[in-house]
Image (cartoon, rainbow, N blue to C red):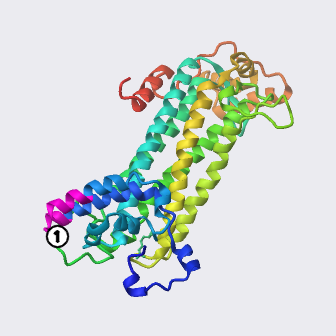
Amino acid sequence: MTTWKGRVGEHLDPQVWEFLRADDAQLLAYDCEATAEHARRLADAGLLSGDELDDVESRLAEIAQAPEGYLDSDEDVHTAIERLLGDVGRKIHAGRSRNDQVAAALRLYVLDACAEARDAIDSLALVVLSFAESEASTLMPGYTHLQRAQPITLGHHLLAWVEMLDRDRARFAAAAEAASESPLGAGALAGSTLELPQPPRQMRNSIDAVADRDFALDYLYAATVLFTHLSRIGEEVVLWATAEFGFARLPETAATGSSMMPQKLNPDVAELARGKAGTAIGRLTGLLATVKGLPLAYDRDLQEDKTPVFATRRDVRLALGALTVLVSGLEVDRERMATAASDPLLFATDAAEALVRKGTPFRDAHEAVAARVREGTFRRPRTRAGRPAPGPGGIQEALVEARRRFADDF
Ligand code: ARG
């Protein structure tokens, strides 16, 4: 069905129809929710009777469960809902347009996707936190430029992952905040002459309300930054699991084998997380390109906002779930890490600082130690305090603080 056959007639070419149709079945439940709210506003204004409102609400509850294939004959999910509502559906579109309708439904979808992402981030972060706890005193080399730099603990390193995830959580919260305003009442772009009550948190400007997709961009941005973090975490797991590093063994719950080489245990989960970051960047860039230069208010270009948002939600859920399994099963080779961390060169900075404590200017101390390193006569200083903690407190305090952020019941 279309909502505009009164104007265009029935002559639409089938190829044009196929081109126009939206692949938006995932919006169904969200549009039902937004439609129920609109129906209540119509009833408040006396434009739907109490019985009609009951009818709409109970039908919407059923429609929201409809299998996706249900919608094949409709231009989009909004049209399908109007058709499936039957007779009362002919009244439901008073005072609204698909322009405010789709914006309202997509906002509800993004709100849910943000909540889902935050829960999945929490699950991964809690696993990383308990990993950090059990490896709080596991020594390892810290790296810059992927060259051994200074000794650290694995717990300290893992807490850096937690910080990244903590910021991701905040970005999804900000995207949810952006999505939580309501475009209902904006109509096509200029509101309506029907005096409907205002929805809570109604957007100030009806033209902006139907044109704005910043909330979808904010969501895609939050997901893209998350994926860049997952790609860095994934890359470290890939490195640690090589025979060359030998710091960690992959769990069989989250590793793959080779179709040809019988000995292989491959880190495909970590690699795919890394690969998905590229796809996420593409989706964000794609939607930015769609809205760039787009005249206000609504244009059909905006139908292209859905595919990247739907696909990103699926990737975020699956990637975080799989990485949670991977990280919870990683087995650390503490001995191998400790051996690598005992490389005397890791203490060169400490040796320079020991000279500074005795009054040598730092640059002179740096040059003196560098000269011994070049000659091959550098020796590790005899005493060395434990590595500095990952924050103003010690590593345990940092763990407690990070745990509090991720688990209310800690
Ligand atoms: N399927 C459309 C979309 O996703 C709904 C809005 C259509 N509005 C219109 N004026 N043609 O954007």
The residue sitting at 62% across, 50% down in the picture is 277
Residue 201 seen in this snapshot: no
Residue 234 visible somewhere in the drawing: yes
Quarter of the C terminus within the rendering: top left
* Residue range corresponding to the magenta coloring: 42-56
The image shows residue 10, relative to residue 141, as above or below, that is below
* Predominant SS of the magenta segment: helix
Q: Is residue 291 left or right of residue 197?
A: right
Q: Quarter of the image containing the N terminus?
A: bottom left
Q: Which residue appears at 79% of the width and 22% of the height? A: 378
Which residue is at a point 55% across and 54% down the rendered structure image? 311
Where is residue 386? Give x, y as percent. Answer: 59, 17
Relative to 26, say whether 338 is above or below.
above
Q: Quadrant of residue 237?
A: top right
Asked whether residue 243 is drawn in magenta, I would say no
Please, which residue is most extreme toward the top here? 382
Asked if residue 199 is positioned above or below residue 149 in the image, the reply reads below
Residue 320 percent location from the top left of the image? 55, 39
Amino acid type, label 1: Leu
Label 1 Cα crowd, 10 Å radius (few <14 / some 14-19 / many 20+) = some
